[in-house]
Image: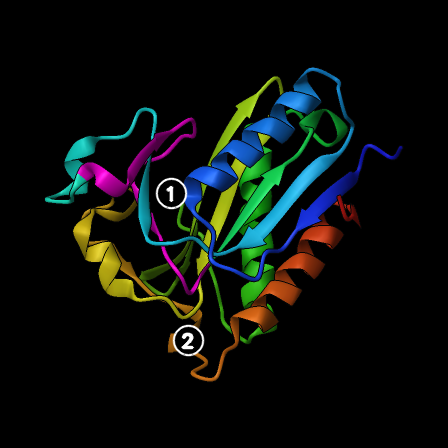
Amino acid sequence: MDKRTSIINEPHKISHFEDIFRLQEEYQRNLIDHKSDLQFTWIGEHNLCYTIGKGGNRKNLLNLSKNNVFTINRGGEVTCHMPGQLVIYLILDLNSYKKDLDWYLRKLEKVIISILSHFDIKGKTIPGLTGVWCGDKKIASIGIGCKRWITLHGFAINVDCDLENFNQIIPCGIKECQMTRISDFNKNININEVKKIVKKIIQKEFNLKFVSK
């Protein structure tokens, strides 16, 4: 089977973070153990929760209750997931691409900028920071894990979510970081329309052949 083949999972319902986290780890483990050559792509939404990287500063949680905070095996600081935000997880074998995490991060930024461009939104990167901004506001966050060059986690794009949820944290550990969303530029945006574009651009940029499970 082509090593660029990926299972695609696009649930219509809102998903609990912990369920999809376990699913990611399962596919990563199967690739590491050579039980499967299938990569994995997940495109969906989460119930409200917060995640923080294994080396993250918990002071960035502010006064947030720890009940819906997950410390996970990715780099980066704290971020927020919620309905109306599109989350994309990519379990990719970088042995089939390029064994360079900086290359991979920059590739994800390029993917996000291409997605935004489709909706006539100009995204940009900021030197020294990871993610994508529109002007001085952040619209998409990236957080990845990697083991034996098999990736975990991915990125999140704010589509039409409630940005007030970010007030409970210092997003990505960046003080005075302001967030924005696609609906601030396009009030009639439909998240399912964004999903279609995300799928198309990911497939193109990573030369993936999508299959159902």
User: 135 or 4: which is nearer to us?
Assistant: 4
- Residue positioned most to the right: 1
Quick one: quadrant of the C terminus?
top right
Badge 2 amino acid:
Ser
Left or right of 64 on screen, residue 31:
right
Residue 129 is labelled as: 1
Structural crowding at the residue carrying mark 1, measured as other residues with C-alpha within 10 Å and reported as few (<14), some (14–19) or many (≥20)? few
User: 77 or 193: which is nearer to us?
Assistant: 193
**Which element type, helix, strand or loop, lies under badge 2?**
helix
Q: Nearer the viewer, mark 2 or mark 1?
A: 2
**Of the residues under marks 2 and 1, which one precedes in the sequence?**
1
Left or right of 43 on screen, residue 189:
left
Left or right of 61 on screen, residue 118:
right
**Which element type, helix, strand or loop, lies under badge 1?**
loop
Q: Position of residue 32 (x, y in %)?
A: 67, 18
Residue at image location 62% in from the left, 60% down from the top: 198
Q: Position of residue 112 (x, y in %)?
A: 54, 56
Residue 183 is labelled as: 2
Quick one: quadrant of the N terminus?
top right
Structural crowding at the residue carrying mark 2, measured as other residues with C-alpha within 10 Å and reported as few (<14), some (14–19) or many (≥20)? some
